[in-house]
Image (cartoon, grey):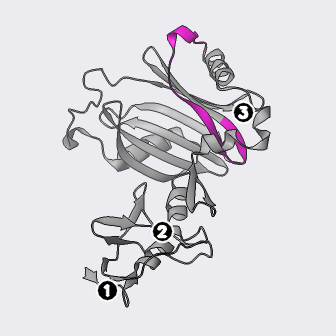
Amino acid sequence: MKRGFGKGFVSGMLVVSLAVGLGVTAMAATRTIKVEDDIQVTLNGARFQPKDADGNEVPLFSYNGTTYAPVRAICEAAGLKVDYDSATYTAVLTTQDQYIASTPGASNYITVEQAKNAALNHAGVKAGDAIFVKAGLDWDDGRVHYEVEFYAGNTEYDYDIDATSGAVLSYDREWDDFSLKGSGSSTATQDDLITEAKAKEIALAKAPAGTTVVKCELDRDDGRYVYEVEMRNGNMEYDCDINAVTGVIIDWDADRDD
C-alpha cells in the first residue's frame, strides 16, 4: 500500500533510518517523499522485527524500488559485527571470524592448519584424502572454536575444535548417499517423500525419553531431500537429518548446551 507514511519522510530522516542504532545522523538536503511502508523481513523463515538500541521497533520502507532498513539490527541478526566511524560517516561491518581473529586473545589461538590437523587426526583421515569446504573461527556459548568441514570419500565430516587447546568439542560424520538410486535425489516428487510427522517420529525414536522437537523442516542437501530435525532434552541438543524418501537417519549430532 502506498501512502505518505505519517506526514511524509524527508531525506534527512532516510539517513536517520539507515543509521539507527549507530547513534548518528548526517546532514542532507530536505524534501518530502512518499514511500511504501509495511515492509517485512524474515530471517530463516521467521518474521524479524528490527529494533534500535533502546528496544524500539524500527519501521522498514521502500522508496523507488529500494528497501531501507537499519544497518545495525539487520547485520547483527546476520552475524556481522557493526561499528561506526563518526569521522568518516562509515558503517564498519566485520564478519565474525575476522572479528574474533582481531581480539586481544587471538594470539593464544591455534592456527587454522592446526585445527584442520586436529580434525583429520580424530577422523583418521589423511590430509591428501580430504577436501575442505570450511575452516574458520566461530563463537558459541562463550567459547571460541574453529568450525571445520571436509569430505573424504563419500563421507562428510563436521568438527568443532577448541581454538585455544585444539581439543575436539563436537563432531559428526554423514554418509553422503545422494548419488545412489532411489535415495531421495532432486528428481523425487512430493509424493515420494515421507511426511513431516513421520520424520519427527523417526527422530524421537532414536532420542532419549522426554525429548521434544523444536524444529522440523524439509530441505535439499547435496542434491537430495532431507528433513532437518532439531530436538532438546534438558541441556542436551540433538540435530538429526533424515532422508526424506527412505526415512533413513543420515546424520545425528548431540551437543551439551552449557
* Numbered mark located on residue 18 in the image: 2
* Numbered mark located on residue 21 in the image: none
Quadrant of the snapshot with the N terminus: bottom left
Q: Residue at x 66, y 52 (%)?
A: 234
Q: Secondary structure at mark 2?
A: helix
Q: Amino acid at mark 3?
A: Ala
Q: Amino acid at mark 1?
A: Gly
- The magenta segment is 124-145
Q: Amino acid at mark 2?
A: Leu
Q: Secondary structure at mark 3?
A: loop
Q: Secondary structure at mark 1?
A: loop
Q: Earlier in the sequence, mark 3 or mark 2?
A: 2
State the separation of the CA atoms marked 3 and 2: 36 Å
Instruction: Determine which residue is flagged by label 3.
Output: 163
State the separation of the CA atoms marked 3 and 1: 52 Å
Regarding residue 16, the answer to whether it shows in the image is: yes
Disc 3 + disc 2, Cβ < 8 Å: no
* Numbered mark located on residue 4 in the image: 1
